[in-house]
Amino acid sequence: MTNNTPRVPNWVNGCESLPENDAWLDKFNPHNSELLCRVADSSAADVQGAIAAAGEAFLTWSEFTPVRRGQILAEIVAGMKRRADELGECIAVETGKPPQDAKGEVGGAILQAEYFAGEGMRLYGRSLTSGTPGKYSHTVRQPRGIAGLIVPANTPIANIAWKTFPALVCGNTVVLKAAEDSPQIALLFGKIAKEAGLPDGVFNVVQGRGQPAGAALVEDPRVAVISFTGSTGVGRWIAEVAGKRLARISLELGGKNPFVVCDDADLDQAVHWASLSAFSNAGQRCAAGSRILVFREVYEAFRDKLVVKAQSLKLGVSASCDLGPVINKRQQQAILAAIDYAKTEGGRILCGGAAPSSPELANGYYIQPTVIEGLQPSAELSCKEVFGPVVTLHPVDDLADALALANATEYGLTAAIHTRNVDRAMWFAQRVRAGVANINLGTFGSEPHMPFGGFGASGNGTREPGVEALDVYSELKNISFLTRSNLI
Ligand code: NAD
């Protein structure tokens, strides 16, 4: 490390803020493992300072009308549009995504932000009937208070927008715990928000590790909403700790999403979508299609095409590349270990299975797109999320068999089926245990107005985004009044 290594501090009350103990974490470039920056290793006290700022700002922000809040959010959207290239470059460097993917993610985040800025003019309640003559009743949405938002690094600006905009439009203030591996983008977003006129303290960022920084947010009784996107293990811990103090909790967790290929599918389309589902973003999607269930009649034809496709994908960080590295060395090692373990359980590696050996990629956290067959549905890699470009293939006898296997893990986030038969498609979509079911598409691809979330170990039943996200970030109040006809 040199003294010139950039430092990424916290963002509290509209200013950069250094960690109290002058403690810093190293953040490495996933493409070449060079030191990229040093990140504030926030303590619980740092987090408590940010919570205090958010608490103070809540007093005024919650008094702004929803329309006014929406107008300010629209100014942030304008800032994001103006600085879209800068946001994209920042994401590309921090995550190692090819530039077109980083740019696409910024576009998705802007759409998300636009949608929720517009909610300022909707934020509808309901008008209700009453059994009492002259009594009128309606509901309004009120903010809950401070929202603690905890995000991973896989799609960093999308993750920030996904939670921040609905939280703010509902009138909450925010303390965002940024992901250790995408710190700079959170800071940049904070600066764009300030430039756009967001009052100081309404949006704060704490950098650092899950423990102690994230945990301090989860444990603090002043934080009324915890919205977490990340692994199921951490989600379980949050449910316990924040649940005990009756905070509102939204958990968007892992997935092991099934992708079904029927014998009447357009195989080239199925291969196209299966490859995107398994390998785009280096497989680092909660909605990655990581288990492919193929009718026996077309198993070999599909498998051979998918292997050719996987082998054709180019790794690297330039615009001609299909996928970049995974986010850090720990993750790369965990994926390689999962592949090795799959071999001991009878898995046959059809392609990939290792880090690439070419000199220009050898120092990065790359994993070759990997296709594995021969594993039992109960094998570890058939059931557990690896969060990397690794997919397992499983032959199935018919649609009932495919459904049984699709529903055979603890997760239930997304699913896809490829068939030309609408009866089969709808039969499967109705029965698959997943919060999202796609027909002749990939396992991913949510849009701002579509609710997203999962069954089972994929979440706790909340849905973000869509109007459903408003239920996470607001309290409903029922207001009634009695008119007196004798006074007319
Ligand atoms: P992770 O759970 O390790 O970390 C996610 C975030 O939580 C990070 O900011 C981390 O610092 C923080 N954290 C860790 N321990 C914490 C604790 N005890 N208290 C509070 N915060 C804590 O997950 P990851 O490996 O960074 O991300 C990958 C996971 O995220 C995968 O399981 C993936 O499926 C999931 N994910 C889910 C969705 C969804 O919408 N369902 C979207 C993206 C990613």
Image: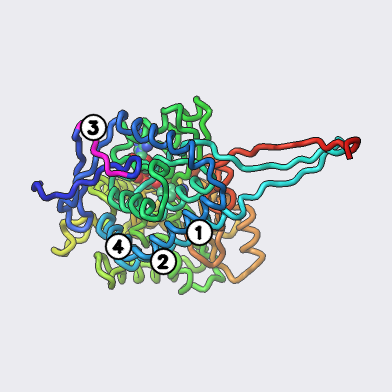
Name the residue at 35% across, 56% down: 390
Closest to the camera, between mark 1 and mark 3, is 3
Residue type, label 2: Arg
Q: Is residue 389 visible?
A: yes
Q: Would you name the residue on which mark 2 appears?
A: 303
Q: Residue at x 34, y 63 (%)?
A: 83
Mark 4 within 8 Å of ligand 1, using the beta carbon? no
Find numbered disc 1 in the image and state the secondary structure of the residue it sits on.
Answer: loop
Residue that carries the numbered disc 3 in the rendered image: 20
Query: Which mark lies nearer to you, 1 or 4?
Result: 4
Q: Residue drawn 14% across and 49% down? A: 5
Label 2 secondary element: helix
Q: Is residue 27 above or below residue 445?
A: above
Location of mark 4 (residue): 86
Q: Earlier in the sequence, mark 1 or mark 4?
A: 4
Circle 1 sits on which residue? 446
- The location of residue 381, given as percent across then percent down, is 38, 48
User: Cα distance, mark 2 to mark 3?
Assistant: 55 Å
Furthest residue in direction front, as rendered: 488
Colour scheme in use: rainbow
Secondary structure of the residue carrying tag 4 is helix
Specify start and end residues of the magenta stretch as a single range: 15-21
Residue 160: x and y in percent read: 41, 50
Pair 1/2: label in front: 1
Residue 425, horizontal then vertical, whole percent: 61, 63
